[in-house]
Each structure stands twice: as structure tokens, then as C-alpha cells.
Image (cartoon, rainbow, N blue to C red):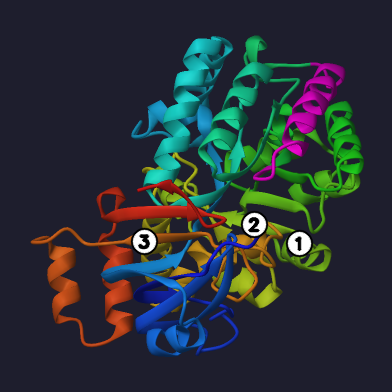
Amino acid sequence: MSAAPEILRALLFHTPRSPFVEETALEAYADGGLAIADGRILDVGPYAEIRAAQPDAAVRDWRGSMVVPGLVDTHVHFPQTRIIGRLGLSLLDWLRSHALPEEARMADSDYAGAVAADFVQALIAHGTTTALVFGSHFGDATKALLQCACAAGIRMASGLVLSDRLLPGVLLQTPDEAYRISRELMAFCQGAETLRYAVTPRFALSASEPMLEACAALLREDRGAIFQTHINENTQEIADVSAAFPWAESYLGIHDRFGLVGPRSLFAHNVHGSDEELARLAETGAAVAHCPCSNAMLASGIFPMRRHVAAGVRFGLGTDVGAGTGFGVLKEALAAYMMQRVLPDGVPLTAAHLLFLATRGGAEALGMADEIGDFTAGKSADFVRFEPVSGTPLAGAIEIAETEGQILTALITQADGTTVREVRVRGKVISS
């Protein structure tokens, strides 16, 4: 039996189209109505119209709140939850000094389980409803993450992190071990509606050719799986990868040789991608995770957004976490705006661009835009309700705002976990 419809009355924002293509992509309803039933969106629009169409629906009066589609994090590392804020190093030195030692601690199942629980709750507390996550190098720790995500109700794609060379020995697996453990975790994901498996070699520097062959086999065997790894993040990393694969014409070309570049592939960072790599990403339908806070913290460089847009490459936002500044996808949107402002050929981003990148853009990058990312009828009712705390600068900015666009920019600039009042996935409350 179908559940009775519910109407959520609030200030609503969504971007059902890309502002990189269409200037009027942002839709805002000052007194809006979002009708939902059975975990699906029925309609969105002015409250009076939605109420007239659904006269028997229960109404939740959220006036004073702002509701946006659930935020999408396209790149984040769960084992790095407790090392946010280790400053002053570039990528490879930061990995050696901070990230890899902490990731080795995930061999302790109790410790990993505690971190996994904190990680999932931190995502939800910041309004993230969907995340593509680097799991752990250890099967038990990765399963603990997936179990926490499943229990909490958040959407997650994650998997065992695969490496068989150049990292500390405790973090390595043989290709056969990696394949076996990954298959076990895949089976767990296939039994959960909100989970998806992600084949996850750490980066080409720590993955041999046999390991990349194992990755290709895993992708072939699970057509619902996604592929994720790092690419073109740091100039020294790129030089080292080139030396490790002397036959490859490019960093992307290493993965392409093994059939790992396609519509289910997402590559984190790509700060230093060549024109040829961008063209190949677009041709194959692969996507990129843009992590502006991490790129700045590790001095990796500024994401060439204009070149990605011109090439037709899909991209969303990633918090990265350990190398970044926290779990806020809206904070990443603001950082993307600022980084593009200082780049000579940067893209002049508007509030519509930032909301798109935090929601539908991320959904497109993950190949999930038919299910999530905006309030189009038929999509899953995944959304976040923000409400400013009385007496705060955000509340004051909203009070004097003259347009919905000014309210949205104030929200993106100032919102944090304290402003999140409710988070839903498939219409179910996962935080309130």
C-alpha cells in the first residue's frame, strides 16, 4: 500500500539542469512545496500549486528553512578522519608522514570500527547523502565502513583499497588476495539497496600491472561497480608514475590500457591533466572529482576547470578529508569559487554553479543523475534541510537578502553542521 503524500513547505533550491550549459538552471521557490511519497519526489513548485494538486497531503511547515537536494561527495577517505589539519607538506611527504601510518592503524578492527562510525556520522551531519569513499587497505575495516553506512541509511560506494608495491608492507596485498577480498565485499554490497561497490586501486604508483588486471576483472564481474583512483594530483607523483610505467604515454593511459577508463570511472584531482587526457575522459564518459581544499592544502595546484568544461568532462566535488579541511561539501563549493577567482582563466562561478556541483554535478559524475541530484519528479527523496541559528551572521544575512540568489550564496558561504536540521535519503530521516 502506498504511503500518504507529504508536502514540505520551505524555501527550495535545486538545479535540474547544468548552469555550465544553461544560465537559468537554478530553480528557487521562496514559498515552495516539495511533495513526496514512498521515498520518491512527486512534484516541486510554489507551495500554493503543490497544495492544490495534493489537497489531502500532510504538510510540514518548514518556513524559515532552506531545503536542497542531498549533497554528493565524490572523493573522500574514511581512514583519514582523525588526521585532518596536518599542515605544511606536499602530497607524497604527507602520505609518508601522516596518511599511511594512520591507514595502517585500520588493521585494528576495533579502532577501524570506531573511525567508521565517526566518519559516517560526520558525512550525514554535514548534509551528505551520497559519497564515493576510499575504504581501507584491510577487508575487515572496509566491511565495518559498509556496515555503518548501511545501518545509517546513507548512500555509499566504497571498496577495499588495493596496493601491491611501494607502500609499507602492512598495507599491501597480492593481486590474488585483493581480488578475493574484493569479491567478498562486493557480495555484501549487492545485498544492500544503498550500497555500491567501488574498485579502488590507491594510485598507479602503488599498483602493479597484475593488480590493475585484477581491477579490470572485478569491474567486468560486477556491472554495477564503479572504479575510482587518483590521477595527476601532484607533479612529483606524475613524474614517479611515469618512471614506474615507461611504456605509458600518459597517467590516464595506464588505466586505459587495462580497460579502466569509462562511464563507471571517476578519477580524483586531475589538476595537471593534458589536453589529450581530457579528450579521452570526455570520449569515454569518465568523470573527475574536484577537491579544491585538498589541492590548496597540499599545494598541488589549481584545478583547470575551464579546460574540463571546454572538453566536456563531467566533474563533481570531493572533500578528500585528511588532506582537506573537513566534511563540508558546501565548503568545497565555496573553495572552488575562490580558487577559480584567483586563476587567470578561471570560470566565474555563480551560486547556481556551486549548488549544481554539490548536488546534481556529483550525481552525474557518479552516473546516478537518474536517481538523485535534484527535485525532478520520480527521483529519490534525498534532501537536506538547513535552518540558520537565530542571532548568527547567517541568519542576519538571510534576513536582509533581497533575492533567493543572495540567500543561497549566504547559505553556501556560512552553512556548516550546526545549520543542518534534517537529512533524508529515500524519504527516510537519517539525521534530525
The answer to which image quadrant residue 85 occupies is: top left
Which-is-in-front pick, marks 3 and 1? 3
Query: First in sequence: mark 3 or mark 1?
Result: 1
Mark 1: amino acid = Leu
Residue wearing tag 3: 385
Residue wearing tag 1: 281
Q: Which residues are magenta?
A: 174-195
Q: Nearer the viewer, residue 240 or 33?
A: 33
Q: Residue at x 43, y 45 (%)?
A: 124
Separation (CA) of disc 3 from disc 2:
27 Å
Q: Nearer the viewer, residue 275 or 216?
A: 216
Mark 3: amino acid = Arg
Task: Check if residue 122 falls in the magenta segment.
Answer: no
Q: Residue furthest left?
A: 391
The answer to which image quadrant residue 380 occupies is: bottom right
Local crowd size for mark 3, using a 10 Å CA cut-off: few (<14), some (14–19), many (≥20)? many
Task: Check if residue 180 falls in the magenta segment.
Answer: yes
Secondary element at image label 3: strand
Q: Left or right: where does residue 164 sit relative to residue 326?
A: right
Tags 1 and 2 touching, CB below 8 Å: yes
Q: Nearer the viewer, residue 341 or 432?
A: 432
Which-is-in-front pick, marks 3 and 2? 3
Separation (CA) of disc 3 from disc 1:
35 Å
